[in-house]
Image (spheres, grey):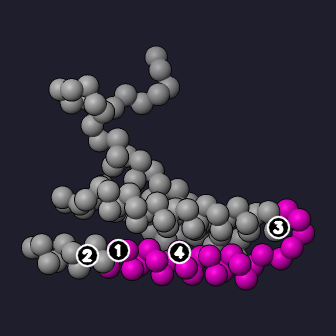
Amino acid sequence: MSAVQDFPIDDAGNPVGCEEDVLAARWAAMHQAADAIAKMLGQSGAGSERAMSLYPVGLPGGDLAELEEATGDLHAMMEQGLYAILRARENGAEAKVAAKTLLTRFENRRRALLSQEREQADLAA
């Protein structure tokens, strides 16, 4: 038995559904990082602002390339920001201001991304 997940394949032998799974995993990881930052700041990790959703896979007919780019930018911001915060703390620096800024930027960009997708879905309906 393999620990690697088997993905369904199409008639040509190409994996099907992998893009959505990667986007969902990236989306969940960003929210887990945001929760960790919130807890570091003494805030509750759970809440409507940081609620995980199936956003990338829940959009009907969404353009995967656009979703990949948008979530990729947000993911890179979180990854680099969290790394910098952890390095600063490791070296004895107080990183609460940076952590709060990163969390605020993440929430603002995520909110803008979600509202943009909602507007596009409304226009398509």
Farthest top residue? 1
Identify the mark nearer the N-term, 2 or 3. Answer: 3
Sequence-wise, which precedes: disc 4 or disc 3? 3
Secondary structure at numbered mark 4: helix
Magenta residues?
A: 90-115
Q: Nearer the viewer, residue 31 or 110?
A: 110
Label 2 to label 4: alpha-carbon separation = 18 Å
Q: Which residue is mark 1?
A: 114
> Mark 2 belongs to which amino acid?
Arg
Residue marked by disc 3: 89
Q: Are marks 4 and 1 in contact (CB under 8 Å)?
A: no
Q: Tag 4: Cα neighbours inside 10 Å, few (<14), some, or many (≥20)?
A: many
User: Tag 2's secondary structure?
Assistant: helix
Residue 94 belongs to the span the image colors magenta: yes
Residue 48: % across, % down: 44, 75
How many labels sit on residues? Answer: 4
Q: Is residue 124 left or right of residue 27?
A: left
Residue 28 falls left or right of residue 44: left
Quick one: quadrant of the C terminus? bottom left
Looking at the image, is 42 positioned above or below residue 28? below
Label number found at residue 106: 4
Q: Is residue 68 visible?
A: yes
Q: Looking at the image, is mark 2 or mark 4 earlier in the sequence?
A: 4
